[in-house]
Amino acid sequence: MAVRRDVARNRERIVRAAAAVFRRDGVYAPLDGVAADAGVGRATLYRHFPDRGAVLAAVLEDRVDALEAYAAEHPGGELLEHLVVEMSWFMVDVHGLMSALATSVVEPARLEQVAARSNALLGRALADAVAAGRVREGTTLDDVLLVTLMAGALTTHPTVAPDAVGRAMEICFDGLRPGRPPGTLPRPELR
């Protein structure tokens, strides 16, 4: 059964408005504001999305759609860095995203689907980056995910300046690039 155009249009407007409101006011902003920014009533919003988690899941799914489209247009060895930067800054821009995800605001099955799509996208970009010599061989998807999680963790600390996220990503990518062998940091001696 085909979805009516006005229903699909309202859903898209709600998702776009939610992304803007969450960026501006955080993920715990009143959903009435999302409905108002989308130009729909509360009832329309709740017909599409029964709760905040469903709205947030749709925003995350829309973000992965955009990243997949970007990846299709920009293949190659540099894609990995672009994806990590986009994902990390999204976490910075959407205040409260990390805590909302940690407290299972989003239905676990939908969150797993978003994670699987993101991981597949990053995995392909990682393989291309290794092949192009942009990151050293032996770099794993877990290494890449750690970079994004560290950037996201910075967003939860109230005194960290936004430019610290960019610096942290530079430091992390410097560690992934060829040139310095892994495991060359000194071991702790003062335990």
Image: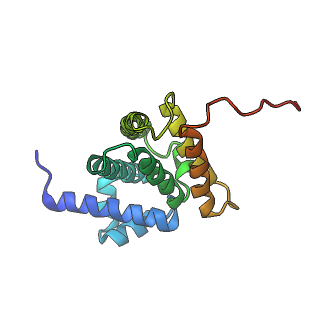
- The answer to whether one can see residue 50 in this image is no
Residue 23 in the image: x percent, y percent? 47, 64
Q: Residue at x 36, y 52 (%)?
A: 63
Name the residue nearer the viewer: 38 or 70. 70
The mark total stands at 0
Left-right relation of 191 to 128: right
Is 189 located above or below residue 27 in the figure? above
Q: From the viewer's perspective, tell me whether residue 11 is left or right of residue 114.
A: left
Q: How is the image coloured?
A: rainbow
| Rendering quarter of residue 107 | top left
Direction left: furthest residue: 1
Relative horizontal placement of residue 8, taking residue 27 as reference (left or right): left
| Residue in front for this viewpoint, 14 or 191 | 191
Q: Is residue 124 visible?
A: yes
Quadrant where the C terminus lies?
top right
Q: Which residue is at a point 36% across and 71% down the rendered structure image?
A: 37
The quadrant of the image that shows the N terminus is top left
Q: Residue at x 30, y 72 (%)?
A: 39
| Residue in the picture at 29% in, 54% down | 48
The answer to whether residue 72 is above or below residue 178 is below
Residue 61 image offset from top left, x and y in percent: 35, 48
Position above or below: 29 against 130: below
Nearer to me, 32 or 115? 115
Looking at the image, the residue that sits furthest to the front is: 179
Q: Position of residue 151 (x, y in %)?
A: 58, 50
Of 52 and 19, nearer the camera is 19
Q: Residue furthest right?
A: 190
